[in-house]
Amino acid sequence: MLIQSDERMETRETTSFMVGVIEGFYGQPWTMAERFELFGWMARWGLNTYLYAPKDDLNHRALWRQLYSPSEAKTLGQLIEACQQSQIRFIYALSPGLDIRYSNEDELDHLKKRFEQMNGLGCQHFSLFFDDIPDGLETEDTGRLGSLASAQCHVANSLFKWILGSCPDARFLFCPTAYCGRMADGKLGGEGYLATIGRELLREIDIFWTGPEIISREITVNHVQALREVLRRKPLIWDNLHANDYDGHRFFCGPYSGRAPELRAEVSGLMCNPNTEFPLNYVPLRTLAEFARCRGAWDARAAYLAAIQEWLPYFETVGRQVTLEDLICFGDCYYLPYEEGPEGRSLYASARSLLAQNPSEWGDQAALFQARAARLRDFCVRLSELRQRPLFYALNRRLWELREELDLLDRYVRMKSENPSPGILGSSDFHLPGTYRGGIVAGLQGLLVQQANGGFAPTHAA
Ligand code: GDL
């Protein structure tokens, strides 16, 4: 029944490099309309794979044993059909790791029933996730299967062999419990976890990997080549570069970067798990698609500028229109997890340098900063008139916050320009204690300050 490993790997690796999107974040899953829009983008740009895995679809994770209701199943069927029409590979993922008893055959039956239901709706490709779960094993499972890694391989291999009976061309993906370098170094999953997965998981099954970190600034060829030795296959990149579910203040619309084009030959695919708010993903996905097919060197900034120009028409307002320059400046303030774009960096640097100096030394710097801040604030105001309301709703909280901070800095600079005597901070009717930067989270955030080396210290000791 099982197709020879090497033959299969050969055809897969040469003909079906997977590049596309994982709906795999925490938070509200995308709507059907958003997914259809996504498939349109993907088909136009040459992204070939969509992986259905929203962490907060209850049936994906918490209720993994429960079949979908007829109406839910109908919706998923429409999704699969839409992918087929656009020639996009639809992959369905289940995450049973929160409470599965690995050695219990009934559990395997639950998984089969779920995959069977999805197969009945037209799904041909499957995935089993064991990320973000407790890394212990029940005593009974340890007795029968030995280790967490062996237990997961047992379940995944059994399911894969079984699914080949109805889907002979199935792609089968596996997300390990230790899925990045830091987790492997910390021995998540137990001693020798990844080595066991590499040895025992059938060679036809692809293994996800997010790089050296969960959110990897860079993923190098060397890093991936070393991992390949352990996994005994090319890893499949689960890229969290643009994921924002871990920080509600931010989103990322910078370019796909920190990965060289040579990486493509070392992995079985590049799958991006992007911003939770679907409308914010135009540039991330557009630049991923360009990266996947680029020849020669990769110029991330050039790709960003080209993609943001394409994104501009989505910013049509009912009033005064926004300009490309303003959109670039705004995008530069929400660029990538580890870096802002040039305009964002320079705006921040100019505010910082003003505050570090005596107002008598400001010269024309103050006016320059105020002009830039005013322009960005005005851009934020104009976005409240966006025709595409879902785009505005996705941005709204960040726009509000950015305006608030720019406004405060502007007031401060103005006040100091007029009265440079030290010690006067002034006050603002718009930033009242309690309502401004208030609440328990802001309070808790203030208690521990992160140090340059990544560690934390109590505020008073920092
Ligand atoms: C994770 C989760 C993912 C989440 C991301 C960013 C993997 C394999 N799993 O750890 O669902 O969106 O971090 O917060 O990345």
Image (cartoon, rainbow, N blue to C red):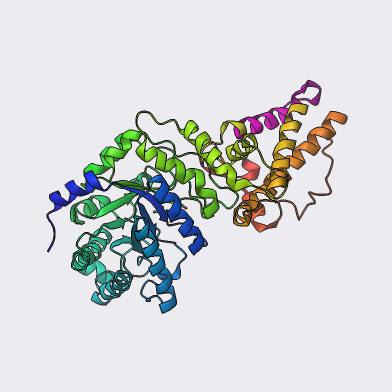
Placement of 351 over or under 81, stated as above or below: above
Identify which residue, 362 or 253, lies in the foreground: 253
Where is residue 378? Give x, y as percent.
Answer: 73, 41
Asked if 159 appears above or below 272 in the picture, the reply is below
Q: Nearer the viewer, residue 14 or 81?
A: 81
**Residue 120 appears anywhere in the view:** yes
Q: Is residue 380 left or right of residue 360?
A: left
Relative placement, left or right, of 200 versus 462 is left
| Prevalent SS, magenta region | helix
What is the quadrant of residue 60 in the picture? bottom left
Where's the C terminus, which quadrant? top right
Ligand 1 rendered quadrant: bottom left
Query: In the image, residue 107 lies at what x, y percent?
Result: 28, 74
Is residue 122 highlighted in magenta? no
Magenta region, residue range: 344-366
All told, the count of numbered labels is 0
Q: Residue at x 78, y 52 (%)?
A: 433
| Residue in the foreground of this view, choosing between 460 and 325 | 325
Residue situated furthest right in the rendering: 419
Q: Position of residue 84 (x, y in %)?
A: 34, 60
Q: Which residue is pictured at 50% across the width and 58% down the height?
A: 34
